[in-house]
Image (cartoon, rainbow, N blue to C red):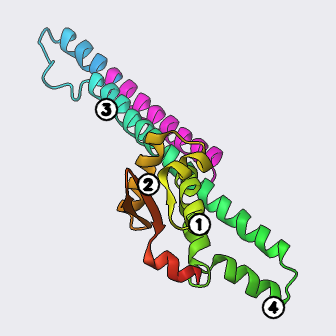
């Protein structure tokens, strides 16, 4: 269900609740007026006999409308973001279908591009944020770089290189070896093996 249709359905539901609540409130008000008029003719108080106070219907109508409208507004963005993700997936699969003319060679190539078993190094780089990729790529192409060389290649500050290397080291994607006052950076054993 798209956003406009969902908005229309919830809007109609709220209008229906307000209409029914208004009708019940009006009916209770008229009943209360009739009972009070009858009580004034009999010179007695009939306030306890007249039935439900119309104010309760009004408050109930407002409460139910607020719950329906507020509840919908809370899930509306989730509903549309799920819709957007599904639409993007659909668009991506349509694009892949259009790009491949149907030959088995193209199908094999597209499976290789997606399959992390055949290209784990490329897959890891695709999944990393840009700053981490800018640090890991030079290490993969030239293992044993120093942090100073990485700083020059990535155009990051000394502290940014150190923080990013630490984050990649915690993930197990690279490791450092002390050499004098600096470190040499190497890809993890798993990445080294996938490269060969």
Badge 2: how crowded within 10 Å, few (<14), some, or many (20+)? many
In the picture of the structure, the residue carrying the numbered disc 3 is 60
Reading the chain from its start, which is encountered first: label 4 or label 3? Answer: 3
Looking at the image, which is closer to me, 188 or 21? Answer: 188
Report how far apart the C-alphas of labels 4 and 1 lie in the structure: 36 Å
Residues at circles 2 and 4 in contact by the CB criterion of under 8 Å: no
Reading the chain from its start, which is encountered first: label 4 or label 1? Answer: 4
Q: Position of residue 7 (x, y in %)?
A: 58, 42
Q: Which mark is residue 104?
A: 4
Q: Which mark is residue 142?
A: 1
Q: Secondary structure at mark 4?
A: helix
In the picture of the structure, the residue carrying the numbered disc 2 is 165
Residue bounds of the magenta highlight:
1-29
Q: Secondary structure at mark 1?
A: loop
In this rendering, would 53 be left or right of 139? left
Asked whether residue 195 is drawn in magenta, I would say no
């Amino acid at each position: 269900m798209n956003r406009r249709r969902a908005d229309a359905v919830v809007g109609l539901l709220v209008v229906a609740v307000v209409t029914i609540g208004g009708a019940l409130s009006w009916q209770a008000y008229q009943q209360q007026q009739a009972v009070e008029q009858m009580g004034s003719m009999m010179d007695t108080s009939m306030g306890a006999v007249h039935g439900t106070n119309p104010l309760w219907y009004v408050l109930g109508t407002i409460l139910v409308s607020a719950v329906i409208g507020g509840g919908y507004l809370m899930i509306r963005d989730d509903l549309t973001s799920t819709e957007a993700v599904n639409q993007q997936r659909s668009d991506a699969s349509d694009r892949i279908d259009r790009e491949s003319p149907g030959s088995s060679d193209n199908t094999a190539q597209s499976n290789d591009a997606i399959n992390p078993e055949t290209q784990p190094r490329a897959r890891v780089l695709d999944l990393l944020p840009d700053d981490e990729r800018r640090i890991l790529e030079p290490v993969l192409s030239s293992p044993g770089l120093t942090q100073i060389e990485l700083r020059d290649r990535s155009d990051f500050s000394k502290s940014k290189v150190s923080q990013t290397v630490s984050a990649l080291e915690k993930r197990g994607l690279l490791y450092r070896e002390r050499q004098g006052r600096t470190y040499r950076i190497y890809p993890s054993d798993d990445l080294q093996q996938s490269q060969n």
